[in-house]
Image: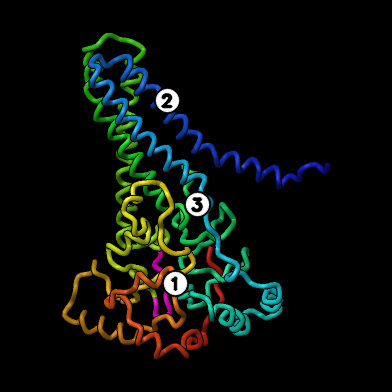
Amino acid sequence: MAPASPSSVKRRCRRCLYWIPVLFISIIVCWSYYAYVIQLCIVSMENIGEKVLCLLAYHFFVLLFVWSYWKTIFTSPMNPTKEFHLSYADKELLEREPRGESQQEVLRRLAKDLPVYTRTMSGAIRYCDRCQLVKPDRCHHCSVCDKCILKMDHHCPWVNNCVGFSNYKFFLLFLAYSLLYCLFIVATDLQYFIKFWTNGLPDTQAKFHIMFLFFAAAMFSVSLSSLFGYHCWLVCKNRSTLEAFRAPVFRHGTDKNGFSLGFSKNLRQIFGDEKKFWLLPVFTSQGDGCSFPTCLVNQDPEQVSTPTGANLTAKSIENHPFPSKPLRESQSHLLNDSQSWTESNGNSEKGTLGMSNPGLTIENET
């Protein structure tokens, strides 16, 4: 058996280091369980009714928290399907062609029948050199995972995983239940924290655990509330973290609200149509992660309207090159509202899209 190369050993060490934040969170949760259940509820609480009620509520919150955290960590990010990958012949053809218009023609031909509407900042087809594929909309290459992730939001070190299409709902529930978990501990631990702080109770082993448990839960509550609030705002706008920092580029130009379909439809894209499953960490997101319905109305409701804003908006709607390629069947039902989609513009320009900009250049995004 051949010895492992230095590069493979380095990769294994790096993978082990990536699990340190997850291990840290796991240790904190295990200690908080001991501090709350044993030291607070069993040792410090004297009222039987209060003790039983707190134990039942605590185990309910910790179960949902651990369940959603587990699903966020161990749900593999989804990668683009085979149709977005270049065949062996296409790879050879692309490598033989000099960079420029020839490679653009190859990529435009490959993307012609794919549900791809976004472009790079320079207007080129989004192509990944490392994975050798045409990037689907909202897909990005993760440098940590070294692969393209569908609807990538960010790579989270606290879960040692990419947060994307396959586990974004789990990540939101993880933030929500971890926040509720911390707030519940703060609320039920507060009176005992005050008693120990004011020497109202004798010094015991429970004093350290109860006081430190309150400080830790309060500290995590502050950080989690801001992070959870930010992601709730992203869900309402139907944006990922990456899209919040750099708006997606469509054929008509940059449009940060291009994927927004309204609050209700944006919410259902993440949580699905079955409301009974919304609060459970089970996958219910709509679509396949490779194609998404677009609004393609270049109007930002957050901006203050001007006297000429209506005319500019109307003009931009008339000139919008709507996608010529149909969405997947799993996405098309989201666009039943006529205010979110206009088919006439897409049909009239179907024959010209993708070839109207001769200055396209290949640009790789990471």
Q: Residue furthest right?
A: 1
Q: Amino acid at mark 3?
A: Cys
Q: Quadrant of residue 175?
A: top left
Name the residue carrying label 1. Answer: 329
Which color scheme is applied? rainbow
Name the residue carrying label 2. Answer: 31
Q: Nearer the viewer, residue 264 or 224?
A: 264
Badge 2 or badge 3: first in the primary sequence: 2
Which residues lie in the magenta part?
A: 246-253
In the image, which disc is placed on residue 162?
Answer: 3
Query: Residue at coordinates 51% horizontally, 62% vertically from top-left?
Result: 140
> Cα distance, mark 3 to mark 1?
27 Å
> Cα distance, mark 1 to mark 2?
48 Å
> Does the magenta stretch mainly form a helix, a strand or a loop?
loop
Q: Quadrant of residue 92?
A: bottom right
Mark 3 residue element: strand
Q: Assess whether mark 3 and mark 2 are in contact (beta carbons under 8 angstroms).
A: no
**Which label lies toward us, 1 or 2?**
1
Q: Measuring from the top left, give residue 93's x and y in whole percent.
A: 69, 79
